[in-house]
Image (tube, rainbow, N blue to C red):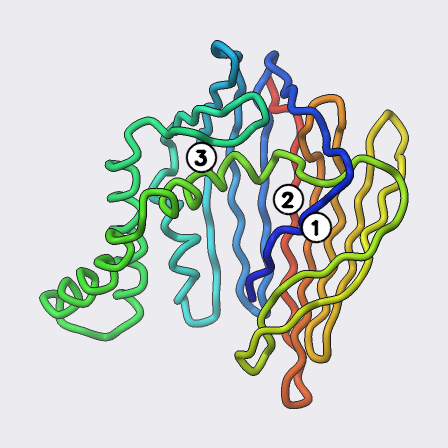
Amino acid sequence: MLLAAIILQASTATFAPPLDAPRRVVTERRDGARTYRMERDVRFARVDKGYRAEVTLRAGIGETPDSSGAAYEAGFEAFAGSTIVFHLDPRGAVVAIDDMPALWERFCRRVAEVAAARHALAPAEREKLAARIAAPLRALPVERRRAMLASLVVAVIADEATTPGSAPVRLPGQSAYGGTIALEGRRTVVALPDGLLRSTVRADAADVAFERVTDMDPRTGLITRNSKTLRIRAGGLEKVSVTLLTVERAAD
């Protein structure tokens, strides 16, 4: 279930990330019986008119009853212990990534290895399957590759409205039965203590309900906490996916 970003007409937070210390970012996802957790440190530095962001992955752990995992999430595990350098414009958009071809090849190999390992095959056949799985990833346009890798840093950058109030939203998505649907709902922004803001988006359709709650600091343009809950109902059953992202100053 993919939800497109909400187009906001109201003002958004100014991007002025803290430069004094890295931020520890923890992503936790529970999708039915499957769980996933990734930790990374993000350090920003001022460079010319934009910024440099160094992302160091500390851990990526996935667990499922059948040990299948999520292939794309496992792809990021290929970078555990590594530091990736991103170049951002003044608004926080990623414009370049150092050594992107080599990074993408590591990502493709890891995704293919994890996906192929799900099948009980002889080593030679598993290698052939992994090659077939990796091929379409290697063929993705450069913009798609950059966007997938950039998610490691842009996930902490607020793109929510900062004007308190409530407004209708419309999110395109996919039905539990495979068709395209529109989720209708509202976005509400309220002030929190210490100068923070909270944006709450709730939208639903016949068989899909979505909620996103984002706490952000408009002074830095960074998210401090973000939770997403997606409920899909089909055939009398309900599938719930919950993702929680937290951002805090890393320990010295």
In the rendered view, does 37 fall on the left or right side of 125? right
Asked if residue 187 lies left or right of residue 142, the reply is: right
- Which of the two discs, 2 and 1, labels the residue nearer the N terminus? 1
CB within 8 Å, label 2 to label 3: no
Name the amino acid, label 1.
Ser
Residue 131 numbered mark, or none:
none
- Give the mark nearer the N terminus: 2 vs 3: 3
Report the residue at 79% width, 62% height from top. Answer: 185
User: Does 54 appear above or below 152?
Assistant: above
Residue identified by numbered label 3: 57
| Three-letter amino acid code at the position of disc 3 | Leu
Residue found 49% across the figure and 42% down from its top: 151
Q: Could you tell me which secondary element the residue under label 2 belongs to?
A: strand
**Residue 24 percent coordinates (x, y):** 59, 30
What element does badge 1 sit on?
A: strand
Q: Which residue is mark 1?
A: 227
Residue furthest out toward the bottom: 235
Q: Residues within 10 Å of mark 3 (few under 14, many from 20)?
A: many
The N terminus, quarter of image:
bottom right
| Residue placed furthest toward the top | 48
Residue in view at x 29 percent, y 51 percent: 110
Give yes or no for contact between labels 2 and 1 (Cβ–Cβ under 8 Å).
yes
Given residues 55 and 37, the one toward you in this image is 55
Residue at 72 percent of width and 69 percent of height: 209
Residue 163 x/y as whole percent: 84, 36
Name the secondary structure under disc 3.
strand
Residue named by callout 2: 245
Residue 193 vs 63, above or below: the answer is above
